[in-house]
Amino acid sequence: MIRCHLSTLMGRDKLRVSDVARITGLNRSTVKSLCNETATRIELPAISKLCELFRCGTADLFEYLPDETERNV
């Protein structure tokens, strides 16, 4: 499972979904789905824009957590 820490970064910088969408040029629904961790895919340019905005790396934005089924393999 991939966890997205966008909402944490937004809270740290006191930004709303609309702020992030406006600043990065990303679609509001893209930002919202990442915040709610319901996104099923994200384009590399979008990741780049988010990392640039929050001055972070991809590891700060996303985290891999093995599923229970993966741990038992």
Image (tube, rainbow, N blue to C red):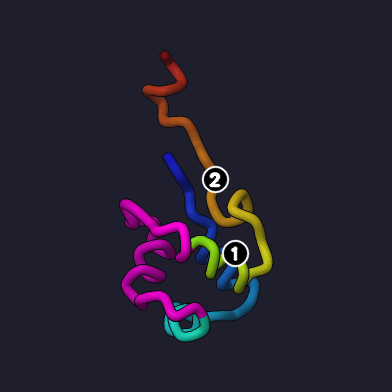
Residue at the (50%, 36%) spot, across then down: 65
**What residue range appears in magenta?**
24-46
Residue 19 location (% of width, % of height): 49, 84
Residue 67: image quadrant is top left
Q: Quadrant of the C terminus?
A: top left
Secondary structure, mark 2, is strand
Secondary structure, mark 1, is helix
Residue 3 location (% of width, % of height): 48, 48
Mark 1–mark 2 Cα distance, whole angstroms, equals 14 Å
Residue placed furthest toward the right: 55
Residue matched to label 2: 63
Residue 24 location (% of width, % of height): 50, 78
For residue 43, the mark is none
Query: Amino acid under label 1?
Result: Cys
- Tell me which numbered mark, 1 or 2, is placed earlier along the sequence: 1
Residue at the (34%, 53%) spot, across then down: 41
Query: Amino acid under label 2?
Result: Glu
For residue 51, the mark is 1
Q: Nearer the viewer, residue 34 or 14?
A: 34
Q: Quadrant of the N terminus?
A: top left
